[in-house]
């Protein structure tokens, strides 16, 4: 099972899991608002609320309203593309719910980079289903795995397992993934010292206001993941330093309904440019995700020992 086991051990699933976190800024701060808070559908738009203000004051006032509105819903459909230097390029489509932690059902397609090469060399598909649950992440490696794992298609990774593959703690990964939601993109722009309103633009047929800002990733680590221990925060800062990421530029487009419709995060890494583009739609859509059948699932730790 060297080929498919190597794919699992190389952390392909871990990269996929972290890619979800990349849908939001690494340095975004945690929101004080709770999902499920009531949303006033008759509320003025962010632009109307900030009317008469200029510069950063306009952007901050408008985005405060967007943050409150986005915190009042707990789910959305997601369509994203992610590039991480020479390591990988991929697309993700599916739905996420962040009412209580984060659950999601996504289809992931690797389109390039060393990760896609590893999958092809192992005879695995570059398109796979993935499920995010509060206690674990599951990825379907298809027939390549089933042929060598007693017919089982799914691999289960606990957050501790994912931590081993990424050189980070399981608590960091769990906190990063489980606290990821569109509100973080709003938080990130609000945390930027150079926040500004770029103007009105069209995003997939929706009129939206474009905001942008740059954040110091290391400085925001503690605010982004307040539940991490001091040791885990130090480890995260070390990982960021090794990756070469120091700042991120966050661009956010907000609809007239005061909800994010697109978020773009860019940064420079030692393996090349990193860019994530995420489109949000169908806020409030129902999301139902269950763990795959036990009879069709193998734990990654057991897979490694075979």
Image: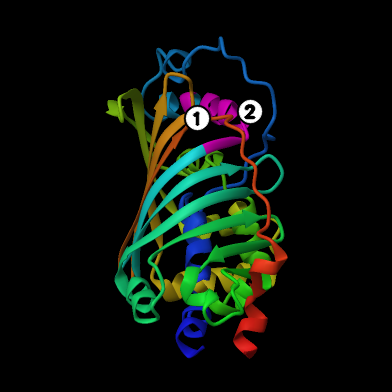
Label 1 vs label 2, nearer the camera:
1
* Residue 282, disc: 1
Foreground of the two, 123 or 85: 123
Q: Which color scheme did the rendering employ for the protein?
A: rainbow
Using the rendered view, name the quadrant where residue 226 is placed. Answer: bottom right
Residue 48 in percent (x, y) is at 44, 13
Between 187 and 52, the one lying in front of the other is: 187
Alpha carbon separation for disc pair 1 and 2 = 14 Å
Asked if residue 170 can be seen in this view, the reply is no
Q: Main secondary structure of the magenta part?
A: helix
Residue 154 placement (x, y as % from top left): 59, 67
Q: Residue at x 66, y 81 (%)?
A: 301
Q: Which residue occupies 63% across, 35% down?
A: 74
**Are there few (<14), some (14-19), or many (20+) residues within 10 Å of tag 1?**
few
| Res 4 seen here | yes
Residue stretch rendered in magenta on the structure = 62-76
Q: Nearer the viewer, residue 16 or 47?
A: 16
Q: Is residue 292 left or right of residue 121?
A: right
SS at mark 2 in the image: loop
In the rendered structure, the answer to whether residue 49 lies left or right of residue 89 reads right
User: Was residue 14 drawn as part of the magenta stretch in this picture?
Assistant: no
Q: Position of residue 149 (x, y in %)?
A: 59, 80
Q: Quadrant of the C terminus?
A: bottom right
Return the disc, 1 or 2, that comes first in the chain's sequence. 2
- To which residue does mark 2 refer? 72
Residue reaching furthest top?
42
Q: Is residue 75 located in the magenta-colored stretch of the structure?
A: yes
Q: Residue at x 60, y 63 (%)?
A: 138
Query: Do callouts 1 and 2 mark residues in contact (Cβ within 8 Å)?
Result: no
Does 20 appear above or below 258? below
Q: Secondary structure at mark 1?
A: loop
Q: Quadrant of residue 250?
A: top left
């Amino acid at each position: 099972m060297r080929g498919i086991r190597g794919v699992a051990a190389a952390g392909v699933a871990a990269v996929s899991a972290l890619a979800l976190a990349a849908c939001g800024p690494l340095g975004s701060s945690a929101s004080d608002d709770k999902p499920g808070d009531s949303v006033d559908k008759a509320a003025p738009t962010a632009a109307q609320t900030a009317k008469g203000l200029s510069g950063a004051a306009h952007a901050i006032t408008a985005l405060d309203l967007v943050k409150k509105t986005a915190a009042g819903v707990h789910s959305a459909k997601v369509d994203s593309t992610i590039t991480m230097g020479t390591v990988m390029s991929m697309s993700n489509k599916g739905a996420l719910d962040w009412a209580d932690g984060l659950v999601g059902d996504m289809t992931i397609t690797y389109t390039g980079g060393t990760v896609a090469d590893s999958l092809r060399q192992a005879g695995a598909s570059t398109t796979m289903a993935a499920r995010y649950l509060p206690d674990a992440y599951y990825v379907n490696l298809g027939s390549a795995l089933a042929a060598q794992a007693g017919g089982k298609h799914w691999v289960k990774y606990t957050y501790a397992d994912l931590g081993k593959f990424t050189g980070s703690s399981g608590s960091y990964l769990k906190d990063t993934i489980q606290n990821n939601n569109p509100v973080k993109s709003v938080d990130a722009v609000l945390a930027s010292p150079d926040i500004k309103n770029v103007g009105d633009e069209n995003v997939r047929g929706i009129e939206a206001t474009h905001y942008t800002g740059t954040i110091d990733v290391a400085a925001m680590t503690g605010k982004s993941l307040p539940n991490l221990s001091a040791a885990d925060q130090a480890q995260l800062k070390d990982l960021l330093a090794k990756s070469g990421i120091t700042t991120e530029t966050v661009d956010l487009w907000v609809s007239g309904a005061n909800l994010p419709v697109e978020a773009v995060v860019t940064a420079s890494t030692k393996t090349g440019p990193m860019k994530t583009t995420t489109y949000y739609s169908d806020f409030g859509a129902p999301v139902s995700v269950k763990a795959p059948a036990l009879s069709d699932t193998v734990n990654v730790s057991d897979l490694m020992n075979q």
